[in-house]
Amino acid sequence: MKALVTKPPFSALNCFARYLAGGVSLKQSRYISRKRLFLAASGVGVEDNDALKLHHQIQQYLLSVKKLKGCTTLSIELLCEVNKRLTPQSGDAGKIRSVRNWIGGGGIEHAIYDCPIFLQLYKAADDLLKTDI
C-alpha cells in the first residue's frame, strides 16, 4: 500500500528559497529537480543525499529568515549566527573575517572591489546596526 503524501500549500518564500539560500543551493544542487527535492523533504523513496543537503540548506535559510523577522534589534551576534547557519561548510562560518579580502582581478593590486580591511569591520557593522532603515 502506498503512503499518502500531501502537498503543502504554496508559499513564494518556500518556492524561491532554494535560489536565496546560498551555499550548495546555488552550486552543486542546481540540477536537483523540484520532484527530487519534494521526495527528499517528505522522506518518501530512495535516500537522495544531494537533495537532502539542498533541503537542509533551504530549511536553514527559512529558519534564518524567521529568526531575523522575529528580532526587534539586530546585533553582530545574530548576524554571525545566521551566517554560521547558512555557510556551515566555511571554516570561518559565524565569525567576522580576520583576513584581507577583495573581489576579482586575481590579486589585491588588480581587484575590482577592495573590501574594507578586516580591522574596520566591527566598527562598520556596528555603524550599520545603529542606522535606522
Image (spheres, rainbow, N blue to C red):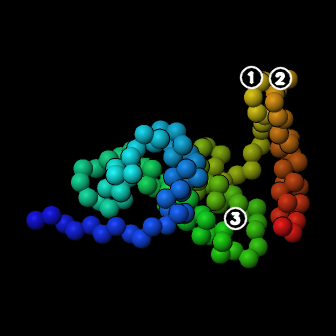
Image-quadrant location for residue 42: bottom left
Amino acid type of the residue tagged 1 in the rendering: Gly
Tell me the number on the disc at residue 78. Answer: 3
Where does residue 1 sit, x and y in percent of width and height? 10, 65
From the image, tell me which residue sits under label 1: 106
Q: Are marks 1 and 2 in contact (CB under 8 Å)?
A: yes
Residue 125 location, quadrant: bottom right
- Which residue is more in the foreground, 90 or 70? 70
Looking at the rendered image, the quarter that the C terminus falls into is: bottom right
Mark 1 and mark 2: Cα distance apart in space = 7 Å
Direction from residue 111 to residue 24 in the image, left or right = left
| Element on which disc 2 rests | helix
Q: Amino acid at mark 3?
A: Leu
Q: Are marks 3 and 2 in contact (CB under 8 Å)?
A: no
**Mark 3 surroundings: few (<14), some (14-19) or many (≥20) residues within 10 A:** some
Which x, y percent locates residue 88? Answer: 56, 49
Residue 14 sits above or below residue 121 on the image: below
